[in-house]
Amino acid sequence: MQRKQLNFLYLNVGHFLDHLFMLIFASVAALRLNSEWGMSYAELIPYATPGFIAFGLCAILAGWIADKWSREGMIVIFFIGIGLSSILAGMASGPLEIAASLTLIGVFAAIYHPVGLAMVVHDRERTGIPLAINGIFGNMGVASAALLTGFMIDNAGWRSAFYVPGIVSILLGIAYLMFVRAGISAAANEAPTPLAARQSIPAAKPRHVLLRVFAIIFFTTALGGLIFQSTTFALPKIFAERLSDFAGTATRVGWYAFLVFSLAALAQLVIGYLVDRHSIRAVFATVALLQAVFFYTMTQLSGIAALLVAIAFMFAVFGQIPINDVLVGRMARSEWRSRAYALRYVVTFSVMASAVPLIGWVHGTWGFDRLFQILAFAAVTIFCATLLLPASESRLPGQALK
């Protein structure tokens, strides 16, 4: 395996772990801690909020350090730091301790998206498929969070759900550090390749076009973050309530969530292929409209019908993920791309952090039917915003900001 391919594999595994760690507590709170600590689901969920705030706010600092220092070095810190933080979460004896540990997880998890995605698109003209493959690994982390956590809860206790992936992440961090050092040693013996030979300099964009596109990116990113967080975080609880006839244990709930997330992950390949060959505006609008339809359909459903519609709306939710990343990759130059991705993900994860208490409040006050109505409205708003994307700019690969 070539070094570039192996590096891509490390980045993909990192994306898997990033989303896995951020959702372990969602399943633990829904399936075990509410009974063990004598707290309701709505009371437990707010303790995850500081972690999601850190997940968003620390992305800017991570992107700046990566652009100024080393992207590879930041990925090493990500692997080891998030692993140690997860082990601390497994040692928590009360809600305040687990909140502090989840905040540390959020701090180190913030590194991945601005740094890892900048590395994925580096020196690539067509970025849709690489971002889609990377996104699938992230989605499988989402899927595996419910499955692995449910399995660990039933067989080894909830603490093991934090311990095991934490140890794995630390070992991967050490392995990646050795990989990077080996690459530095090899590069020292090679003649440097001129920048012009490695990367073409794309044409500049008019200022008004850049402002328009980035405004749409940040607006749809905010609403997309609300939708993504609400669906991925709440799905284990939704299934525990609506699939109770055939999902009576934590493991079974985890399996059904894993099934939905795994099937929906294939959407990223489909969308990645389409955005490399067709207008992003048309693809984006279609995905948003499908989200609105499926969310509205989900209200009042239970049993097999709820499972099938959940697969459909998660397919549309996951399908949106690579679209904004492709737009950022096309508009931002390499030397500040980590910071561009950081700004995008600050918006995403800040909204995701606010979505956590919103989920608990909406569920405790009205139930999940009202949540799906809110998400349907958000998806319609995204649909309207995508129609404002410039048609010509949305289909041309390789465009960047001077």
Image: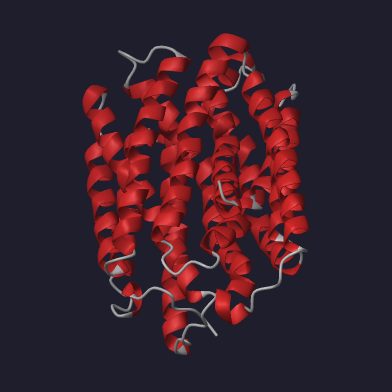
The quadrant the C terminus occupies is bottom right
Q: Position of residue 38 (x, y in %)?
A: 61, 17
Query: On the image, which quarter does residue 384 sit in?
Result: bottom left
70 lies above or below 192: above
At a point 31% along the width and 48% down the height, the residue shown is 316
188 lies above or below 376: below
Query: Is residue 60 rendered to the left or right of residue 235?
Result: right
129 lies above or below 195: above
Query: On the image, which quarter does residue 130 sit in?
Result: bottom left
Query: Is residue 146 rendered to the left or right of residue 33?
Result: left
At a point 24% along the width and 31% down the height, the residue shown is 308
Query: On the image, which quarter does residue 116 sit in?
Result: bottom right
Residue at the farthest top position: 155
Numbered marks: total: 0
Tell which of 307 and 7 is nearer to you.
7
Tell which of 217 and 172 is nearer to you.
172
- Residue 58 visible in the shown view: yes
At a point 63% along the width and 68% down the height, the residue shown is 339
Q: Position of residue 45 (x, y in %)?
A: 57, 34
- Residue 375 visible in the shown view: no
At a point 43% along the width and 49% down the height, the residue shown is 133
Q: Position of residue 19 (x, y in %)?
A: 55, 41
- Display coloring: secondary structure
89 lies above or below 318: above
Query: Is residue 5 rendered to the left or right of residue 221?
Result: right
Tell which of 95 and 213 is nearer to you.
213
Q: Position of residue 282 (x, y in %)?
A: 25, 66
